[in-house]
Image (cartoon, helix red, strand yellow):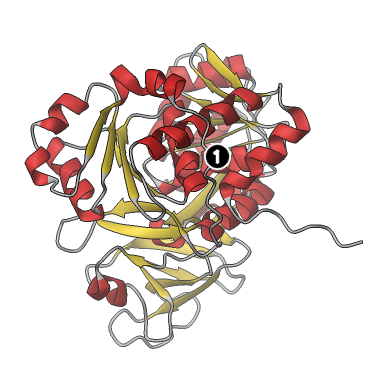
Amino acid sequence: MTTPAAPVRPVDVLSAALANDSHAVALRHGDRSWTWRAFMARVRAAAGMLDGLGVLPGDRVAHLADNGPATLEIALACAWIGAVYVPINGRATEGQAAYIVDDAAAPVLLAGDGRAERMSRVRVLMPHLRELVDMERSYELLLADAPASTRRVEVTGEAPFCQLYASGRDGFPRGAVLTHAAMASVCDVLADAIGLTPSAVSLVVTPMSRVAALSQALMATRHGAETVILPEVTAAAVLDEIETRRVTHTFVPPTLLAAMAAEPGAADRDLSSLVNLAYGAAPMPPSMIRAVGSVLHTNLLQVYGVTEAAGATTVLVAADHADDVRVASAGRPLPGVRLRIRDPRSGDGIPDGMVGEVQVSTPRAMTAYWRQPEETAAARTPDGWLRTGDSGYLDADGYLYLVGRLSTR
């Protein structure tokens, strides 16, 4: 008997999770929680809301907000109707947010956390915009009034799921287009690497406008695990949430990880529920890694990746943190990823141990920078490898050691 293939689209897992245990908790935010049945209903209502706003398949839906349940709901609602999710960091200025909305040609902007009024002042900078929705005042009302969407659009795995903005060479952000298949794949390989199961509790800390946190939340949802979104991020709050919610997995930047270890009484915290504590997005010296490990007494795991490759590219597993040499590395490639080091100017190969540009080959790579063919071409080598813009080297065992950023990309 052949085992059915896993769903291609991230949104497909909702139906599977609902069939398995509709009364289990799917999502928590502060003191509020939603079962899978309630969460599914909210996603379909959000899809109905977008229908009512005239969103069509392929349309970009911009969402400016801090982390919250709406981020995951809107992302999956977009997938439900074939639209493309464009999250914008809640810390963006009005001008920065308007640039992204205009660049994406988004007909709808969902503005949360008191930002709608400020965005209305710069509406002239967003000529494609038809609807500016004040999420803080009307989201729950819109969900309550919207009929559950019956217009589920069947898209292929190669259809765009999200458009994530990363800094460009000219100082303006570029929208990396990532497909349904890419996001589903990175969720699956990362879940396997970190040991995430349906009984897991995954704590989201970093901004969900970025690929790391967005894929973390999608991964937990796709695999039927509970997602906890932290309303206010401080070192103490993260430690409190791990203890209170019995969190099994989370991902934090090195600065926050160091702050957690420096928090008074950190060594006495009960972090025994953690399967591992992942970190990444910036360098972390081995001395700091050891110091953190000695205080928090949990398995550390490093993840390295770039937005253009759907995030996670390499993983340094917990066992390698005990190795005095490998602890300085970013680990080895995840399944579906190949790495190579090239001279950034000539493109020639470089022997193991020598520093050059880190290049990636993966089916999870972006399809393009939205409407920027020259930037897209510059991001790839003639033979199709993605240029990360990072410098580093590989050792004989395939471990990647990062050195810095290149100025040529």
Left or right: 52 in relation to 96: right
Q: Position of residue 165 (x, y in %)?
A: 30, 52
* For residue 401, above or below residue 295: below
* For residue 397, above or below residue 238: below
The residue under the point 71% across, 40% down is 16
Q: Nearer the viewer, residue 201 or 257?
A: 201
Q: Where, quadrant-wise, is the N terminus in this rendering?
A: bottom right
Q: Position of residue 45 (x, y in %)?
A: 49, 30
Q: Position of residue 248 (x, y in %)?
A: 64, 30
Give, as a three-letter code, the residue at label 1: Thr
Query: In the figure, residue 270 lies in which quadrant?
Result: top right
- How many numbered discs sit on the rendered protein? 1
Query: In the figure, residue 157 lies in which quadrant?
Result: bottom right
Q: Nearer the viewer, residue 153 or 249?
A: 153
* For residue 59, above or below residue 209: below
Q: Nearer the viewer, residue 300 or 170?
A: 170
Q: Position of residue 49 (x, y in %)?
A: 41, 32
For the question of whether residue 319 can be seen, the reply is: no
Left or right: 158 in relation to 285: right
The residue under the point 58% across, 62% down is 332
- Looking at the rendered structure, the secondary structure element under dot 1 is loop
* For residue 41, above or below residue 368: above
Q: Nearer the viewer, residue 49 or 387?
A: 49
Residue furthest to the top: 31
The residue under the point 70% across, 43% down is 195
Query: In the figure, residue 236 lies in which quadrant?
Result: top left
Q: Residues within 10 Å of mark 1 (few under 14, many from 20)?
A: few
Q: Where, quadrant-wise, is the C terminus in this rendering?
A: bottom left
Left or right: 22 in relation to 387: right
Residue at numbered disc 1: 150
For the question of whether residue 128 can be seen, the reply is: yes
Residue furthest to the right: 1
